[in-house]
Amino acid sequence: MSLRILVTGGAGFIGSAFVRYLLSQKSITVLNLDKLTYASDLRTLESVQDNPCYAFRKIDICDTAAVRREFEDFQPDAVVHLAAETHVDRSIDGPADFVHTNVVGTCSLLQVANDYWSNLTGDRQRNFRFHHVSTDEVFGSLGETGAFDETSPYQPNSPYAASKAAADHFVLSWHRTYGLPVIISNCSNNYGPYQFPEKLIPLMIVRAVDGKDLPIYGTGENVRDWLYVDDHVDALLTILTRGRVGETYNIGGNAEARNIDIVRSLCRHLDTAAPSTKPTGGYCDLITFVDDRPGHDFRYAMDTGKIQRELGWQPRHTLETGLELTVAWYLDHEDWWRPFLQNTYDGERLGRRRGQ
């Protein structure tokens, strides 16, 4: 396999894991486009920054002219589009940024990719792929039973989910209208090393390390399907190289859990891994409950039968092994996450309704 892959958002959490994974394979050359927002960090790519098969450009995907120049210079065989604003709470506070990046930016990228693909010939045109990475949140909320599959209707409930749903529709429209060979993947909640500490799992870990309260929305009964990031990036490459054009694939960890159970599990791992700093009764003593997130989806669950049947993919990590690895990584890499708390995000509550 010899591929030239252009990755957008490759300095973010999932994007950087994907770039590192690609460069661990043989005969893959990567160009990473990222505008380096608050949640992006080139330190996540230090291990590959000198790799001759890797290049980085600080570029906003909304800058059509700049993106077009990179396509012309790099001549990709595929695009994997990960660049996005992703945090639901921030989308409640400032939805316009999500529309700009996730919708306008995706449309701009699609236009450049389509123009580039249209001018390819022969096998290069037939084999080109545009892989758009999306989320299970586009499907809305489930009750206590059932799971989202690739035919589930879109019912986004947050500005973030709505912006990703719009992007999904635009991607498919470029396929149906112009013939651009696209594939979409919708993933469940990711976790693992290098995740910005505004998301549930890293936030709970870093707050516990500092002896701070562990705030859980509502009663903690909301359910998510958790996907270890290394499993996700393996699925992305599998879909890119073996998936069918025009199709969508659900990616999940087959690991449903209530938020309260996730936090309790993290506390148990911390009790074992960092006992010298734990509270007298254990880290669970730090758990508190706060007002729920506005429009908080009750439950997500992914039916991953399609990707298993068609592509033979399934996650390798159980929830407990993934959480153990994640706790260990954050304990060992305080030098990575501590500057964020000091300079970028101090763990404050985000996503309240206006006036609260």
Image (cartoon, grey):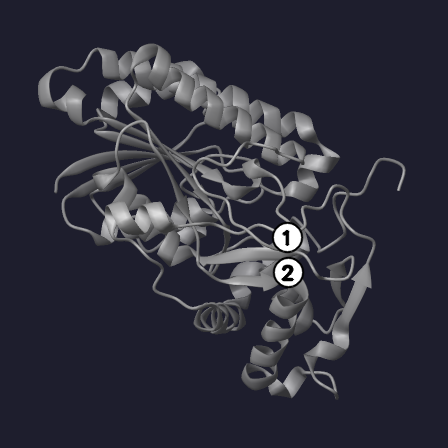
Q: Please tell me which residue is depicted at 45% across the width and 25% down the height of the picture.
A: 61
Question: Which of the image's four quarters has the N terminus?
Answer: top left
Tell me the kind of residue under disc 2. Leu
The crowding category of the residue bearing disc 2, from other C-alpha atoms within 10 Å (few below 14, some 14 to 19, many at least 20), is some
The answer to whether residue 159 is visible is: yes
Residue 141 screen position, x and y as percent? 63, 44
SS under mark 1: loop
Q: Please tell me which residue is depicted at 47% across the width and 27% down the height of the picture.
A: 168
Sequence-first disc among 1 and 2 = 1
Q: Is residue 195 above or below residue 32?
A: below
Cβ–Cβ under 8 Å for marks 1 and 2: yes
Location of mark 1 (residue): 198
Location of mark 2 (residue): 203
The quadrant in which residue 263 appears is bottom right
SS under mark 2: helix
Tell me the kind of residue under disc 1. Glu
Residue 336 screen position, x and y as percent? 52, 60
In the drawing, does residue 45 fall left or right of residue 223?
A: left
Residue 99 screen position, x and y as percent? 60, 24
